[in-house]
Amino acid sequence: MKSTIAHLENCLQEALKAAFSIDATPGSLLVPASNPKFGDYQCNVAMALSKQLKQSPRAIAEALVQNLQVSDTCEPPEIAGPGFINLTLKPAYLETQLKQIQASDRLGIETVKSVQKVIVDFSGPNTAKEMHVGHLRSTIIGDCIARVLEFQGHDVLRLNHIGDWGTQFGMLITYLKEAYPEALTTANALALGDLTNFYKQAKQRFDEDPAFQETARLTVVQLQSGDKETLKAWHLLCEQSRIAFSEIYDHLDIHLVERGESFYNPLLADVVKDLDKSGLLVEDQGAQCVFLEGFTNKEGEPLPLIVQKSDGGYNYATTDLAAIRYRINQDHADRIIYVTDAGQANHFTQVWQVARRAGWIPETVQLEHVPFGFVQGEDGKKFKTRSGETVRLKDLLDEAVSRAQADLEKRLQEEERTESEAFIHEVATIVGIDAVKYADLSQNRTSNYIFSFDRMLALQGNTAPYMLYAYVRVRGISRKGQIDFDNLGSVDMVLKDETEFALAKHLLQLDEIIDEVSRDLLPNRLCQYLFELSQKFNQFYDRCPVLQAEEPLRTSRLVMCDLTARTLQLGLSLLGIKVVERM
RNA sequence: GGGUCUUUAGCUCAGGGGAUAGAGCAACCGCCUUCUAAGCGGUCGGUCGCAGGUUCGAAUCCUGCAAGACCCGCCA
């Protein structure tokens, strides 16, 4: 099914060509109307062309309208203000479109014509540390981006670039050798929580004791060169972490392919060698570097990107360079998306610059950093527990669920409803997790994010519970009227009330939104759309009786309900959010 | 010193060249004999950080300034 905006855009292009022999750049002619009273779409080119054509914008608009053939979809176009062309969709067109999406299991949204191999690199926790609130945004945003691209039909590889290699293991293994040697030889000798504590202590030793530092550095080199005993200890630590991570990923319903930094270890030497061959490599103070263009240090001197440290070890720039090469040459990626905090923007710019100068990035490959702001507490400072500790992701999710459960139980009591334990548990789990995800996704990711349980679990406003409730209302109609939405028979759509028109038009815009999200990688646009959909449905629900309506209105309204529910379910599923039938 | 990001209603945020700048929360006023009121309608609330510039048109683009956050040679 062709999207309405694409169709109208075509018509405008032809009109522009017929009237003025102008070829417009695609996608530039038409935008959704800024205000419903201006119709559904507006075209603003007449003003822009005024100078070039030496005619008044209104004259240009009139000539355009005369050549514009949209009578199949729109009411006669109207020219307003200085030269806006306003288009309003015909009811008959809306009714036909609704019937089409009703009959489609993808709600009329086609898969993309040119399938890309897309790598989404997200989550990326560190082995031997518990996942904490700092991993929340990458995990949730990355999953959403992957889901949207998958739905469009792209070939998506979700990579978990785990921090399972490097200096921290030198520290940790060195520390465990002296403090808790069993942990390095026996599986499950320690819980991950203990490891986190050991990690902190190891870090402290590292910062205080130069001798310890030296041993730790040596251990890293041993690890990177494949020393058996060190490697075994490392394997145990990784396995321990893996178990804890997968618990969280299961809880969040997120799937990733693990390919940690260690994966690229055998490829690191070649990165340095090839940089040397291409003449970019410079030795400076014993370290192998590439000096960057456009980056200077405090003294105004060129800044190096270090790819091999003076002790022979490699660092994360080397790993990222190896990863780029592997992803392009072995995975054949067309688009590589990195979902990390905004603080790493510099790092990626630098690494990509070096990769480009080395000639490793074909022009057809798109590298994108998807940055996001930090999670802050309600005081605007870094999000911490009351005792000042980093918040563990597990604790955060558990608290969301238990708060959701308390809300639900309170409401059940107030309404004198009784529900089974299983029901309460299931609803609370889904609502709690949904709330955490939605709160994060609904905000423009570039700014810092103030985390608040109270706000995300609020029963009204732009929250997960509000949207779940809109969905539940439809399911309520289905139960009450014993409606089988899959078998409504032949349907004649009848749009009467203004809330029905508003809802219908909104339902038909899902394709535009998904397109936009896949392009700009801003999940909050989809959240905004779904929130508005819920609002429009609730307005419709308030104004239009469904089950008591006379035919053919009744069936038509049932279709509107069904389409709303399916759109919500699909849209939310692209956010990684589950629905419930009752709540 | 260099770089990135942020600054819009009391609070949390949308909007990233187009018409009179929007939403949610908070506050206040209405609406349940009718599909779950976790809902709907309404009122109140703005010098879009400041100053210039580009444009027919700027919250949006450019330049400067201010405030805040983060990054900048051997952590990732």
Image: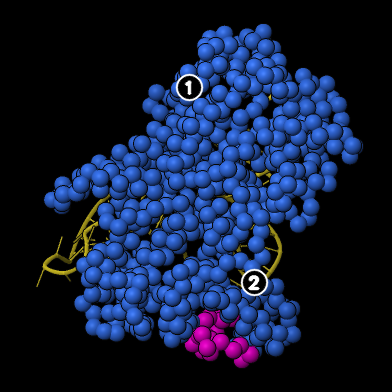
Q: Position of residue A361 (x, y in %)?
A: 78, 49
The residue that disc 1 covers is A188
Q: Is residue A114 left or right of residue A192?
A: right
In the picture shown, does residue A138 fall above or below A573? above
Task: Output the chain of dot 1.
Answer: A
Q: Amino acid at mark 1?
A: Asn
Residue A502 sits in quarter: bottom left
Magenta-drawn segment: A66-87
Please give the name of the residue rendered at 16% of the width and 47% of the height, measured from the top-left corner.
A413
Residue at 30%, 65% (x, y): give it. Answer: A474
Where is residue A392 shown, x and y percent of the image?
44, 31
Badge 2: residue crowd in 10 Å (few <14, some 14–19, many ≥20): few
**Count of marks placed on residues:** 2
Q: Secondary structure at mark 1?
A: loop
Q: Give me the chain letter of mark 2.
A: A
Q: Is residue A77 magenta?
A: yes
Kindly state the secondary structure of the residue where label 2 is placed.
loop
Supply the letter of whichever chain is blue.
A
User: What chain is colored yellow?
Assistant: B
The reply, left or right, for residue B18 in relation to residue A45 is: left
